[in-house]
Amino acid sequence: MPQELDKVDIAILNSLIEDGRKSFRQIGREIKISTPTVQARYRRLVNLGFIKSVSPVLDMSKLDDNTKKEITQVSKAKTSKVKPESNLRVRFLVTFVSNQYMAVQKL
């Protein structure tokens, strides 16, 4: 059964997609809700399995070749262990606004 996401959930996701390093307080100020509400909503999204992990986006051009190889090996090992979940049925539309920002809408 698809999970229902409301406008607050989507606003939190969009804010994190824009910059995953934002604090709950910063997100709350941005979307005009309290910090504890952002925390509770984030925990709910994680518990529902909608947010699977929080990962850095690396600028590989700033790394030397040896470091790139090491990071690539770790990345391949981690992604090979990830198994798709067949019971997760959330449908959403992803719109790329720019190369740094993505809008997510529930269908």
Image: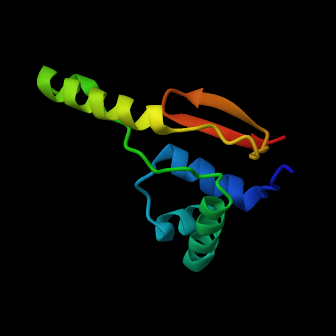
Residue at image location 29% in from the left, 27% down from the top: 72
Q: Is 85 in front, or is 28?
A: 85
Query: Relative to 10, does residue 95 appear above or below in the rendering?
Result: above
Q: Nearer the viewer, residue 72 or 37?
A: 72
Q: Residue at x 84, y 49 (%)?
A: 2
106 shown above or below 75: below
Picture coordinates of residue 71 (x, y %)? 25, 32
Q: How is the image coloured?
A: rainbow
Relative to 39, 21 lies left or right:
left
Between 15 and 52, the one nearer to me in the picture: 52
Q: Does residue 16 appear to the left or right of 4 in the view shown?
A: left
Above or below, comparing residue 32 to residue 75 in the picture:
below
| Residue 59 x/y as whole percent | 29, 30
Q: Using the rendered view, name the quadrant where residue 32 is placed.
A: bottom right
Q: Residue 76's spot in the image, x, y percent?
A: 37, 29
Judged left or right of residue 45, residue 30 is: left
Left or right of residue 45: residue 101: left
What percent of the width, then of the height, locates residue 82?
52, 38
Q: Is residue 6 above or below residue 84?
A: below
Residue at left 63%, top 64%?
Answer: 47
